[in-house]
Image (cartoon, grey):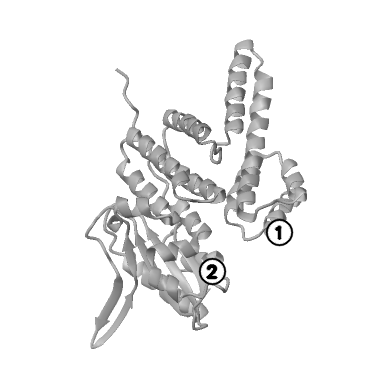
Amino acid sequence: MATTPPMTDQQRADYDSPWKEAISLYFPDFLEFFFPHVYEGIDWSKNYEFLDKEFQQIVRETETGRRDADKLVKVRLKNGQEIWILIHIEVQSQVQISFPERIYIYNSRIYDVHRCPVLSLAVLADEQESWRPDNYSYGFLGGRLTLEFPIVKLLDYSRETLEASSNPFAVIVLAHRETQASAKDPNRRYREKLRIAKSLYQRGYERADILELFRLIDWMMTLPEQFQSGFQREMVRFEEESKMPYITSIERFAREEGLQQGIEQGIEQGIERGIERGIEQGVLRKSREAILEVLEVRFSSVPETLVELLNQIEEKAVLSSLLRQSITVDSLDTFEGMVREQFSA
């Protein structure tokens, strides 16, 4: 009797990267969902700015270890004051005694270097109900230093609350919780991933948000290959019935299925060299399409000059690097500069 293979460590979870990108894409929604009192205090008519370079410098200098999901954002309050918000996403399965100290170190180092008020916020995404650190303090000889920081615990959000909310982070929390719950059960993860993905259509999101949230869910809720193939086929069927081919791009999926069949036939006929070249070109084409899709979702349109530049790149590693950069780059001009650098390297 066949058994379902267990998920590998790589397939079990990727939490940090999806969280980090979700905050970058939906920062106001993040604060409104988790910290509404902070959201209400910010003047959203003024631009906010992510300070990734500044934060990475602080991390390197303090030598406390890399925290991929941590974000640093500069905002303006309604009273005109400029403050920096330091967001910590803590994903772990056991208590970490040093966590409050790390928040204090980052907070104090940012203030020390930039002399700007810093508000630290913490999202506790672990599975231990009792672990809720919200301050760091020490004292001796009559003196005391204390840092208090607001926290939220993902375990506190009920399924009913998450299902009823249209905030993008309700979907992210659902995906996160189900990824944890299905760590050793690919069948359950397959079912829940399908359920969450299909629910995107019932939450009233625009097409661009459905695409973004599906990508984040797919990123976090990794599946073994045989389950992922079934997931894709089920989403194609669902979109055909719904007449909304937002996620899978049914035609592209069909082309990929046809390409796979053609490769198998070619192998049978012994045309190995042509197949290898076809696979290579197909991978490059898909990489370029993925970059353009991310840019179009984020910036609405992509200049033809940039499309032509991408079409000239023939190295898979370069395109993979550009795809990662396209997710967080602040403008199309900056990204086009990155692409041009590849030709002068």
The quadrant holding residue 310 is top right
Of the image marks 2 and 1, the number of the one nearer the N terminus: 2
Badge 1 amino acid:
Asp
Which of these two is toward me, 273 or 174? Answer: 174
The quadrant holding residue 137 is bottom left
Q: Which residue is mark 2?
A: 54
The quadrant holding residue 170 is bottom left
Tell me, yes or no, if residue 64 can be seen here: no
Residue at x 32%, y 20% (from the top left corner): 2
- Total label count? 2
Q: Position of residue 267 (x, y in %)?
A: 60, 15
Residue at x 23%, y 57% (from the top left corner): 129
Q: Which label sits on residue 308?
A: none
324 lies left or right of 166: right
Q: CA distance from mark 2 to mark 1?
A: 21 Å
Q: Which label sits on residue 333?
A: 1
Badge 2 amino acid:
Glu
Which of these two is toward me, 344 or 69? Answer: 69
Q: Position of residue 262 (x, y in %)?
A: 62, 19
169 is higher (above) or lower (below) than 146: above
In this view, the residue farthest toward the top is 269
5 is higher (above) or lower (below) than 155: above
